[in-house]
C-alpha cells in the first residue's frame, strides 16, 4: 500500500507517492481546482491507502478534490493544516493557522534534513521567504508577488507597454521586454538578499534553501551560496505521513 501526497498550489497540482522508503514524484498538471486535472493526474493510479493534501486554493478546490477521491477510491482526503508546534518546528505566527500550509510544510521538510539556521525561499506564483533558527523556531517571513505576477501587474498598470518572454544572463535590458525581465528579477533577488541579511543579524550564518518552479531564474542571479531542493512541500508531506502524531516530534 502507498500514500498519495498532493500539493495543490495556486497554478499547478503536484503530487507524489510514498511507499515505505520510496518517494516517487508524478507529473504536475495545470487547471488546478477543475475535476479534469485530478483525472489527468491519477486516473491510472491504483487505490492508495491514504491521500494527504496541502491545499492553498481554498474550500471549493478542497471539496472538488475530496469528492473526486471519494468517487474514485472510496477514501476521504486528509488536508494538512499549519500547527503551532509539531515535527520539531515551532510556528512563529501569532495565529499559527494563518501561516500558509505550503510554507509550514517547507519548514517541516527542512527541519527533518538540517539542524541549523535556514532561510527557505519558495519561488512560485508568489515568492515567500521564511527563516528558522537552529532550535526549529520559525522567526517569521515575507511574501511578495512571483516573477510572472510582477510582470503582469506592471503591464496592467501602465500604457503602451508590452512584454515578450525573454531569458537573459544579465539584468540590464536594451529593450522594454528585457528591461521588465531584469527589473522583476532584481526585485526578487534584492528581497532574498535583504531577508537573509536581516535573518543573519538575528540567528547568525544560515543555510539558504531555494525551491519552487522559478528557482532557476532566481538562482542564476544570486551572489551568496544557496542550495536548491525541489518539491519541499511534498517532502514535508512525507514527514507528516510517517509521523501521524504531531506532538511526537
Image: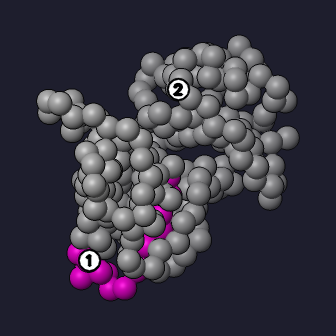
Label whose residue precedes the other's in the sequence (2 or 1): 2
Q: CA distance from mark 2 to mark 1?
A: 36 Å
| Residue 109 shows in the view | yes
Q: Is residue 203 magenta?
A: yes
Indicate the quadrant where residue 130 lies: bottom left
**In percent of the image, x 63 and y 37: which residue is there?**
28
> Split into 4 quadrants, where in the image is the C terminus?
bottom right
95 or 15, which lies in front?
Answer: 15
Residue named by callout 2? 32
* Magenta residue span: 197-212
- Crowding around mark 1 (Cα neighbors within 10 Å: few <14, some 14 to 19, many 20+) is some
Look at the image and tell me in which quarter the N terminus lies.
top right
User: Residue 106's spot in the image, x, y percent?
Assistant: 49, 57
Image: 67 above or below 162 = above
The residue pinned by badge 1 equals 197
x%, y% of residue 27? 69, 39
Q: Is residue 21 left or right of residue 184?
A: right
Relative height, residue 188 to residue 4 (above, below): below
Query: Does the magenta portion include 156?
Result: no
Amino acid at each position: 500500500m502507498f500514500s498519495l501526497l498532493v500539493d495543490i498550489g495556486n497554478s499547478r497540482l503536484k503530487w507524489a507517492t510514498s511507499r515505505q522508503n520510496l518517494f516517487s514524484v508524478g507529473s504536475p498538471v495545470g487547471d488546478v481546482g477543475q475535476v479534469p486535472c485530478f483525472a489527468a493526474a491519477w486516473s491510472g493510479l491504483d487505490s492508495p491507502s491514504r491521500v494527504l493534501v496541502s491545499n492553498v486554493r481554498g474550500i471549493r478546490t478542497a471539496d472538488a478534490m475530496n469528492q473526486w477521491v471519494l468517487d474514485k477510491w472510496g477514501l476521504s482526503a486528509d488536508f494538512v493544516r499549519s500547527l503551532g508546534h509539531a515535527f520539531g518546528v515551532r510556528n512563529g505566527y501569532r495565529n499559527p493557522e494563518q501561516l500558509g500550509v505550503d510554507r509550514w510544510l517547507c519548514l517541516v521538510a527542512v527541519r527533518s534534513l538540517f539542524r541549523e539556521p535556514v532561510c527557505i525561499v519558495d519561488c512560485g506564483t508568489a515568492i515567500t521567504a521564511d527563516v528558522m533558527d537552529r532550535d526549529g523556531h520559525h522567526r517569521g517571513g515575507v511574501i511578495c508577488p512571483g516573477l510572472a505576477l510582477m510582470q503582469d501587474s506592471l503591464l496592467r498598470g501602465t500604457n503602451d507597454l508590452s512584454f515578450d518572454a525573454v531569458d537573459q544572463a544579465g539584468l540590464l535590458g536594451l529593450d522594454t521586454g528585457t528591461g521588465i525581465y531584469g527589473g522583476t528579477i532584481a526585485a526578487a533577488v534584492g528581497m532574498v538578499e535583504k531577508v537573509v541579511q536581516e535573518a543573519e543579524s538575528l540567528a547568525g550564518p544560515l543555510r539558504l534553501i531555494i525551491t519552487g518552479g522559478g528557482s532557476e531564474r532566481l538562482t542564476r542571479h544570486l551572489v551568496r551560496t544557496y542550495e536548491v531542493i525541489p518539491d519541499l512541500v511534498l517532502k514535508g508531506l512525507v514527514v507528516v505521513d510517517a509521523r501521524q502524531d504531531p506532538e511526537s516530534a
